[in-house]
Image: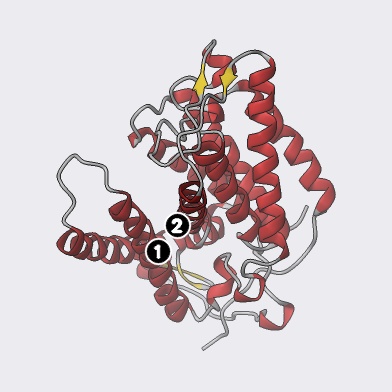
Amino acid sequence: MDDQSFGTPPEAQRSVNSSASGFPGIVFLNKTGLRAGWRLLIYAALFFIFWSVSIYFLGLFLRPAWGVFSLSFQFFGELGSFLAAFLAAWIMSRLESRPIAVYGLPARGAFGKQFWLGCLFGLCEITALILLISAFRGYSFGSLTERGGAIAKWALFWAIFFVVVALFEEFLFRGYALYTLADGIGFWPAAVLLAVSFGAVHLLNPGEGWVGVAGVLFVGLFWSFTLKRTGSLWFALGMHATFDFGETFVFSVPDSGMIFPGHLSNATLHGPNWLTGGTPGPEGSVFDFLILAVFFFVFDRLYPARQVQRYVPPAN
């Protein structure tokens, strides 16, 4: 089995000779520096500060009506949240003397082969899922809600929107947080804990339920697996974005319990919840769990386990 590296290049690997002693050292330090838990708390505090500032200024400039859904506020809110998570990670990378690329978003692979392969997996997942639900008479496409240029406009908007959503959610839950927590408790315990958190956050969405959360948790574990095997989040980003795009726009079904405006058709889901996923949407269908199980197998063959060293900051 490969170790817990996220693809750190060999030339960046160094050994550390520092050691901690005494009560403060035991509580706060280990042989590589500040303990993972404290680093994660600092990161969370930085993220919350930057996120709060971004939401405050968005409210000033966009002035969304209370209780009214605003697509522009949602879009810029997601973008601001990603920038807050990334800026907090950049500050931590300076403090920890690590290249920020080790947190899962290396610039060299940006929107490259792994991203587009992830896009293909995401489209295959949602298409296969809808076809299986349709085979059991659980999905109807309905009539078109948009025509002509409006279809292209909404398709472009939702494609960009869900790339931004994927950037934020993947980096927040499987970027700095996973890298650092894995340093303290190991990769898979950290991945499970953060996947549970990822699923729990989705309970805040109207219409979401526990079955949908289980689906989110399971796909979160799959995306952690792809990170471990590829060394980056680019595959997960592509898959995350296109699955959401397919749910929301192409097949016009609930996405984690939410139905957005600007979808392609008046599609309906009908039948038992085990088939359709119920109010959370198709991601709660039993078929999605089966598809993801197949994806685990396929991805294991595409990207076999490899042995690389985890990045360690240089000794002072």
Picture quadrant of residue 168: bottom left
Taking the image as shown, residue 62 lies to the left or right of residue 23, namely left
Local secondary structure at mark 2: helix
Residue 152 x/y as whole percent: 52, 52
Q: Which amino acid does label 2 sit on?
A: Phe
User: Which mark lies nearer to you, 2 or 1?
Assistant: 2
Q: What residue type is labelled 1?
A: Ala
**Secondary structure under badge 1?**
helix
Image coordinates of residue 191 in percent, x first then y, are 56, 47
Picture quarter containing residue 66? Answer: top left
Mark-to-mark CA distance, 2 and 1: 7 Å
Residue nearest the observer in this picture, 150 or 101: 150
In the image, what residue occupies the spot 34% across and 65% down? 42
- Picture coordinates of residue 184 (x, y %)? 52, 57
Cβ atoms at labels 2 and 1 below 8 Å apart: yes
Report which residue position mark 2 lands on.
168
Residue picked out by circle 1: 85
141 vs 69, nearest the viewer: 141
**Which residue is at the far top?**
272
